[in-house]
Every structure is written in C-alpha cells, then in structure tokens.
Image: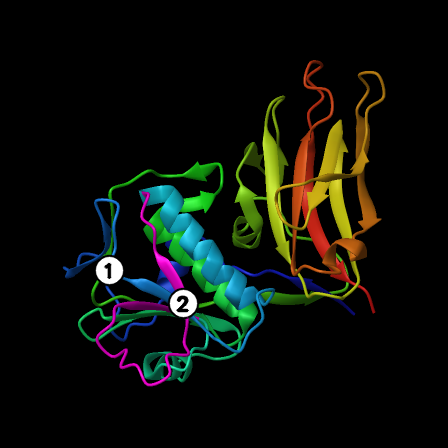
Amino acid sequence: MSRRIIAFAALFAIILPVVSACGSIGAGEESTPLTIVSGGSTEYVIVRNDLYSPDNLSVRSAVDLRRAILAATGAEISLKTDWDGQEDNTARKEILVGDTNRQESKDALEKITGDQFIIKVYGDGTKIVITGKDEFGTAAAVRYFCENFVGYRSETEYEQKDEVVIPLELEVISTYIEIASSDGGIIPGSSEEASLIWQEAGTVEAGRRMLSRTDVLIYKLNGKRGKGYTLELDIEGEYYVTVSPDGKTYSRLFSHSDNGYATARGKYSADVTQYFADSDTLNVRISDYNPTDGMSPIIYSVNLIEKN
C-alpha cells in the first residue's frame, strides 16, 4: 500500500463549510476587527516550541510565517521560543505556532483530532494560536493563515498591504488530508490538487490542467524526512520537470521534446528519495520544454508515492 500525503486541505472557500461553528464567523455575521499589522509595524511576536530543532517542520513554518508577513507588509515581526524563564508573558501579544507551552496552545489542541488544524484567537486577541496535532498539521495551518489572512502564497505571489486584520472571534478548524492509495493520482481541478499548488498556472478543463507556452506550475508536496518516494505524473506534450526541496535551487528530473512532436499521454515516474534526505517537502516545477512550438504540457494527475 502506497501513501500519498497532502499537507493542506483546500482554499478558504472550500474549507469554510467545515469550519467549527463554535466561535466562528458565519456568512453575513458582523465581526470585531483585530489588527495584527498596521503601517508596517506590529505589536505581536511569533512564538514556537523551544524544544524543537531548526529543521523541524513546525519551526520552519514559524519562519515561513515571519517571512510572509515581512514580504506582504514590510513589518519586522520577532520570532521567539516559548522558553521565558520567570518572565510573565500573559499580556504579551503572541502568535503561537505549533504546540507551545502556552495554555492557549494546550486548550486549542484539545479541540482537534489528529488530522485537523486550528487557528483561533483567544480572549481580547492577546494570543492567536496556529497549530495542528503534529508538525504537518501546523504547516497546513500556517499556509492557510498566510494565504487567507496575510495574502501570501509564495515568494513571487503575494499581495502588498498596509494592514493584516482578522476577526477577533476567529476560530477555524479544518482537516488536512492524508490519503492512502494503491493507484491513481490527484486530479486537476479537485480540492486535493488545490491544496498542492504553490504557484498557479494554466487552465483546468474536464480534469486536466493545460499549460500555455510561458506558464510555470509549481506543486508543493509534503512527505517525511528520510522516507523513500516516487513522483508519478500523468502528462502529455513537451514538458520540463524540475524539483527542489527548498524552492530555490531546482534540479532536472525528466523532460520530453522531440523536435516539435509532443509525447503521447502516459504516466512517467522518477525516484525522488534523495530530495527527502534532509527535507519534508518537494517543490515540483512543470513548464513547457519548447515554448515556441505550441506543444505545451497537459497534466492529468500527480502522485507522490511512499515506498514500502
């Protein structure tokens, strides 16, 4: 049995029906605004678990949140651990990422199951919890928060804004997906595919994603460090597929170009185990091998398969 892991359930509009009714904001209801960033500054600090190493996915997600806020608003927000010694932190405005030692983090974790994450404002807004039951759920929660409240999707796709404002009554509880499968893949246009897309590109029609000449599509796949994986793409056309564990330096995985003749549709796979040696994520970048001839890629499915 292979395992396909998806770290983030869907975009906001898709997740909204499963948001917890307790303390959440429904359609048409008024909310009290809570300002996190205004005019390029913030009174909040990001807090993460002191016991985790820097390569833990929860810690890296806290760093990602800091980076997203800086890119979108220009605000420098401090990142601290939850070890304060004898310091009283009850009045300090904190965004708690992952399972910190704060009581609000513990209370939030009691509200969710193993495949869920929660984003919740406590009290007068002094504490904002963003966490899952494990590091993968926390990564999903941070990504959700960045996309839907900060306006940040990737290093090249974000909204410049002066303020980040959320509802004081905010409580989001949602499921991220871990699907077991022995065959098949994730179909373009599905909520599962939406959860994988780091950089949107192309158009979707009848379960296929069609790229144009200059389109660059990036999937962000989550696995587990040190595990073995195979990447499988159901694809046709002239494609160029590169991969990167950090989203910065990409390596060629496979490609097809035959002097203007596109390859027929088929499932093409490659061993990507080496990229998970020191990482929990893999960025898969798909583009047109030869943008001048109009034989652009068409993607029918993507599948990250864990080896037995």
Above or below, 108 against 26 in this view is below
Residue at figure coordinates x 67%, y 44% from the top left: 284
Mark 2 or 1 closer to N-term? 1
Disc 1: CA contacts within 10 A as few (<14), some (14-19) or many (>=20): some
**In the figure, residue 160 lies in which quadrant?**
top left
> Residue 130 placed where, x, y %?
39, 68
> Residue 261 placed where, x, y %?
82, 19
Residue situated in front as seen by the camera: 50 or 260: 50
Q: Which residue is disc 1 drawn over?
A: 43
Q: What is the spatial separation of the Cα atoms under label 2 and label 1, in whole angstroms?
A: 13 Å
**In the figure, residue 289 lies in which quadrant?**
top right
Above or below, 80 against 195 in this view is below
Which stretch is magenta? Answer: 74-97
The disc at residue 177 is none
Query: Quarter holding the N terminus?
Result: bottom right
> Callout 2: helix, strand or loop?
strand
> Callout 1: helix, strand or loop?
loop
The disc at residue 80 is 2
Amino acid bearing label 1: Glu
